[in-house]
Image (cartoon, rainbow, N blue to C red):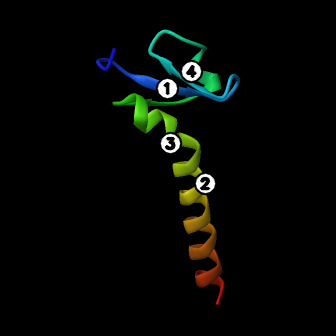
Amino acid sequence: MSEGQWWFCLKHMRVEPEQGCPNKDRMGPYVTEQEAAGALQRAADRNKAWDEQDQDDDD
């Protein structure tokens, strides 16, 4: 079950295959199930980096 696209469902807080909840409730698509599982952490890391960049720009 590794082929296809994977999504992280924000409604159910779990990884889903291509056939799942509506895209409006999901992050993705990701190539692998493992990438989808890390979606929230990746988003948090990016948000933190952007916030730090904004603070640097303000100085």
Disc 2 to disc 1, how far (Cα)?
Answer: 17 Å
Q: Contact, CB < 8 Å: mark 1 with mark 4?
A: yes
Disc 4 to disc 2, how far (Cα)?
Answer: 20 Å
Q: Closer to the camera, 22 or 13?
A: 13
**Horizontal side, residue 31 vs residue 29: left or right:** left
Instruction: Indicate the amino acid at tag 2.
Output: Ala
Instruction: Indicate the amino acid at tag 4.
Output: Asn
Instruction: Indicate the amino acid at tag 1.
Output: Trp
Disc 1 to disc 4, how far (Cα)?
Answer: 8 Å
First of labels 2, 3 by sequence position: 3
Q: Which mark is residue 44?
A: 2
Q: Closer to the camera, 24 or 45?
A: 45
User: Hey, which residue is sitting farthest right in the picture?
Assistant: 11
First of labels 4, 3 by sequence position: 4
Q: Which residue is mark 1?
A: 7
Secondary element under disc 4, as helix, strand or loop, is helix
Nearer to us of marks 4 and 2 is 2
Instruction: Indicate the amino acid at tag 3.
Output: Gly
Q: Residue at x 60, y 74 (%)?
A: 52
Q: Contact, CB < 8 Å: mark 1 with mark 3?
A: no
Disc 1 to disc 3, how far (Cα)?
Answer: 10 Å
First of labels 2, 1 by sequence position: 1
On screen, 50 above or below 33? below
Percent coordinates x, y for residue 32 in the rendering? 36, 30
Q: Using a 10 Å C-alpha cutoff, classify the residue at mark 1 as few (fewer than 14 neighbours), some (14 to 19) or many (20 or more).
A: many
Q: Which residue is mark 4?
A: 23
Q: Using a 10 Å C-alpha cutoff, classify the residue at mark 4 as few (fewer than 14 neighbours), some (14 to 19) or many (20 or more).
A: some
Q: Which residue is mark 3?
A: 38
On screen, 44 above or below 22? below
Nearer to us of marks 4 and 3 is 3
Disc 2 to disc 3, how far (Cα)?
Answer: 10 Å
